[in-house]
Image (cartoon, helix red, strand yellow):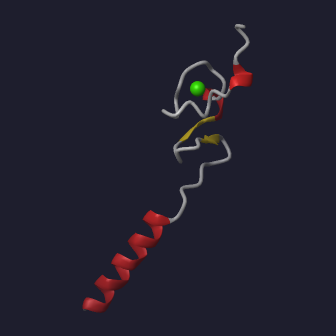
Amino acid sequence: MIVVEVLIVLWTLLVMTAAPSCRRSEFSCENGRCVPLNHYCDAANDCGDSSDEPRQCTREF
Ligand SMILES: [Ca+2]
Protein backbone atom coordinates (compact mmCIF):
# COMPACT_ATOMS: atom_id res chain seq x y z
CA MET A 1 0.00 0.00 0.00
CA ILE A 2 1.65 3.20 -1.12
CA VAL A 3 -0.61 5.26 1.13
CA VAL A 4 1.00 3.72 4.18
CA GLU A 5 4.48 4.50 2.85
CA VAL A 6 3.54 8.12 2.21
CA LEU A 7 2.17 8.41 5.72
CA ILE A 8 5.38 6.98 7.16
CA VAL A 9 7.47 9.45 5.19
CA LEU A 10 5.30 12.37 6.28
CA TRP A 11 5.46 11.25 9.90
CA THR A 12 9.25 10.92 9.72
CA LEU A 13 9.55 14.42 8.26
CA LEU A 14 7.34 15.78 11.01
CA VAL A 15 9.46 14.17 13.70
CA MET A 16 12.70 15.28 12.09
CA THR A 17 11.64 18.91 11.68
CA ALA A 18 10.10 19.23 15.13
CA ALA A 19 12.35 21.11 17.50
CA PRO A 20 14.23 18.63 19.59
CA SER A 21 13.28 19.10 23.20
CA CYS A 22 15.67 18.19 25.91
CA ARG A 23 14.69 16.26 28.98
CA ARG A 24 14.28 18.00 32.27
CA SER A 25 17.65 16.66 33.30
CA GLU A 26 19.28 18.21 30.25
CA PHE A 27 20.33 21.67 29.23
CA SER A 28 19.15 22.96 25.84
CA CYS A 29 22.06 24.32 23.87
CA GLU A 30 21.46 27.20 21.50
CA ASN A 31 22.45 24.93 18.63
CA GLY A 32 19.72 22.47 19.58
CA ARG A 33 21.90 19.92 21.28
CA CYS A 34 21.15 18.56 24.72
CA VAL A 35 23.73 18.06 27.40
CA PRO A 36 23.23 16.81 30.96
CA LEU A 37 22.50 19.59 33.40
CA ASN A 38 25.62 18.80 35.38
CA HIS A 39 27.62 19.69 32.28
CA TYR A 40 26.30 23.23 32.52
CA CYS A 41 28.97 25.59 33.80
CA ASP A 42 31.58 22.87 34.16
CA ALA A 43 34.15 24.82 32.15
CA ALA A 44 33.95 22.37 29.25
CA ASN A 45 32.33 23.25 25.95
CA ASP A 46 29.86 20.39 25.70
CA CYS A 47 27.35 22.02 23.36
CA GLY A 48 29.92 22.84 20.75
CA ASP A 49 28.78 26.45 20.62
CA SER A 50 29.69 27.19 24.25
CA SER A 51 26.09 28.02 25.09
CA ASP A 52 26.42 25.76 28.12
CA GLU A 53 29.29 27.92 29.32
CA PRO A 54 27.96 31.46 29.50
CA ARG A 55 30.17 34.22 30.81
CA GLN A 56 28.62 34.24 34.27
CA CYS A 57 29.94 30.74 34.78
CA THR A 58 33.50 31.91 34.80
CA ARG A 59 34.74 32.37 38.30
CA GLU A 60 38.44 32.45 37.45
CA PHE A 61 38.61 36.15 36.73
CA1 LIG B 1 29.90 22.34 29.88
Q: Where, quadrant-wise, is the C terminus in this rendering?
A: top right
Query: In the displayed structure, would residue 17 be above or below residue 55?
Result: below
Q: Is residue 59 left or right of residue 43?
A: right
The quarter of the image that holds ligand 1 is: top right
Q: Please identify the residue farthest to the top as the structure is shown.
A: 61
Q: Residue at x 52, y 44 (%)?
A: 31
Please state the horizontal and vertical placement of residue 27, each as a whole percent of the image: 63, 40
What is the count of numbered marks? 0
Please state the horizontal and vertical placement of residue 39, each as a whole percent of the image: 60, 28
Q: Where, quadrant-wise, is the N terminus in this rendering?
A: bottom left
Query: In the displayed structure, would residue 23 be above or below residue 42?
Result: below
Q: Is residue 12 left or right of residue 51?
A: left
Please state the horizontal and vertical placement of residue 55, each as a whole percent of the image: 69, 24
Q: Is residue 43 left or right of residue 17?
A: right
Q: Please identify the residue farthest to the left as the structure is shown.
A: 1
Q: Residue at x 54, y 56 (%)?
A: 20
Query: In the displayed structure, would residue 37 be above or below residue 55?
Result: below
Please state the horizontal and vertical placement of residue 3, each as a whole percent of the image: 31, 91
Q: Residue at x 37, y 84 (%)?
A: 7
Front-lying residue, 8 or 42 = 42
Query: In the displayed structure, would residue 34 be above or below residue 10?
Result: above
